[in-house]
Amino acid sequence: MFDNLSDRLEAIYKKLKGRGVLKEADVDAALREIRVALIEADVSLPVIKDFIAEVRVKAVGQEVLKSLTPGHQMVKIVNDDLTHLLGDEFVDIQFAAKPPTIILMAGLQGSGKTTTVGKLAKRFKEKGKNCLLVPADVYRPAAIEQLHVLGREIGVEVFDAGEEKDPIAICKKALDEAVNKMSQVVLIDTAGRQQVDDVLMDELKRIKQTVQPHEVLFVADAMMGQQSADIAKTFDDAIGIDGVILTKMDGDARGGAAFSIKRVTGKPIRFIGMGEKLDALEP
Ligand SMILES: Nc1nc2c(ncn2[C@@H]2O[C@H](COP(=O)(O)OP(=O)(O)OP(=O)(O)O)[C@@H](O)[C@H]2O)c(=O)[nH]1
Ligand SMILES: [Mg+2]
């Protein structure tokens, strides 16, 4: 996910590892380079500042300078912290003990919610789970049809909302149907707005209350870079999110959004979207 950043860090590490002796000034020089690498990866400044300060305290505090392999120690500290920052390991979506597992998607307009519903459904289907997709985006005329097209493409059922125009009513009916049909996973596609607005948040809150989802996934466009961290925070504060899916990582996004979102919300990045195709989803 961070090829450029990894290459940059690798180069910095190489310089460090070769050193027999490391002075505090060397640590600072290395941290400055790491700082630049993170800035170029589009990680937000407050996040970088915290990160560097933490690493520095550890590097100097753990007597790295006096150790026999200071370069290695330093690299280990940076790597441990980076890994920790991004979530120690991949946490897959947990299925509920009592099906259906209900997943609610939320995010701004065009972030990739509907496409990701399709990708997740395909993934679940491959794991032998039968899914029901729920079109709760009643504002954009083509939104419901878009979900039906996706459903047909992957062979997954889509709830037929009929003439119903109230997203909350749609969700209620869809849940009844899911129980009747013994669906194992219910994926709810919601409307997006161009920016955070109270009406949308209120609607999402009410949908959440109604469906009591096991997982609320915030979908963010990686191309939005650092800005996405603030948006993620707003969604988390307003409705509460459990995880993040970062889409469009196949573009020239530099991955900094992932660091910043993780740091600011403390929520794990569940998946990244790597393209428009339905199998372009990676843990
Ligand atoms: N390159 C790339 N494009 C993606 C990815 N995910 C989604 N897209 C594209 O982004 C555009 C918007 O995706 P949608 O899934 O319709 O976004 P949405 O969040 O449902 O949008 P609204 O319903 O309008 O709020 C589409 O053209 C998708 O093909 C991805 O991982 N990579
Ligand atoms: Mg959509």
Image: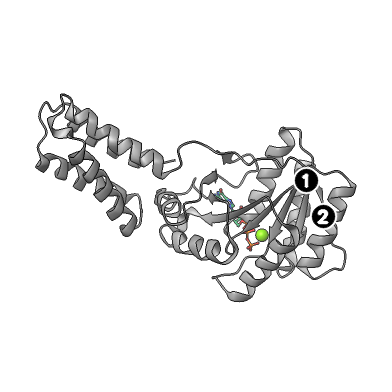
89 and 196: which is toward the camera: 89
Q: Nearer the viewer, residue 78 or 6?
A: 78
- Outermost residue, top direction? 68
**Residue 273 visible in the snapshot:** no
Q: Is residue 152 left or right of residue 267?
A: right
- Which quarter of the rendering shows the N terminus? top left
Return the disc, 2 or 1, that comes first in the chain's sequence. 1
Q: Secondary structure at mark 2?
A: helix
Label 1: state its secondary structure. loop
- Residue 161 drawn at (x, y percent): 84, 62
Binning the other alpha carbons within 10 Å of mark 1 as few (below 14), some (14 to 19) or many (20 upward) gives: many
Which residue is at 22% across, 36% downward? 12
Identify the residue at image location x=54%, y=51%: 244
State whether residue 42 is above or below residue 163: above
- Look at the image and tell me in which quarter the C terminus lies: top right
Residue 35 visible in the picture: yes
When asked about the image quadrant of residue 25, the answer is: top left
Q: Position of residue 102 (x, y in %)?
A: 72, 50
Give the residue number, with chain letter if any, for mark 2: 175
Q: Quadrant of residue 67?
A: top left
Picture residue at 56% right of the left edge, 45% below the top: 275
68 w.r.t. 256: above or below = above
- C-alpha gap between disc 2 and disc 1: 9 Å
Residue at 85%, 60% (x, y): give it: 173
Q: Position of residue 241 (x, y in %)?
A: 58, 56
Residue 55 point in image, percent of width and height:
26, 44
Question: Mark 1 — residue?
Answer: 100
Ligand 2 within 8 angstroms of badge 1 C-beta: no
Q: Residues within 10 Å of mark 2 (few under 14, many from 20)?
A: many
Residues at discs 2 and 1 in contact (Cβ within 8 Å)? yes
Quadrant of the displayed image that contains ligand 1: bottom right
Type of residue at label 1?
Answer: Pro
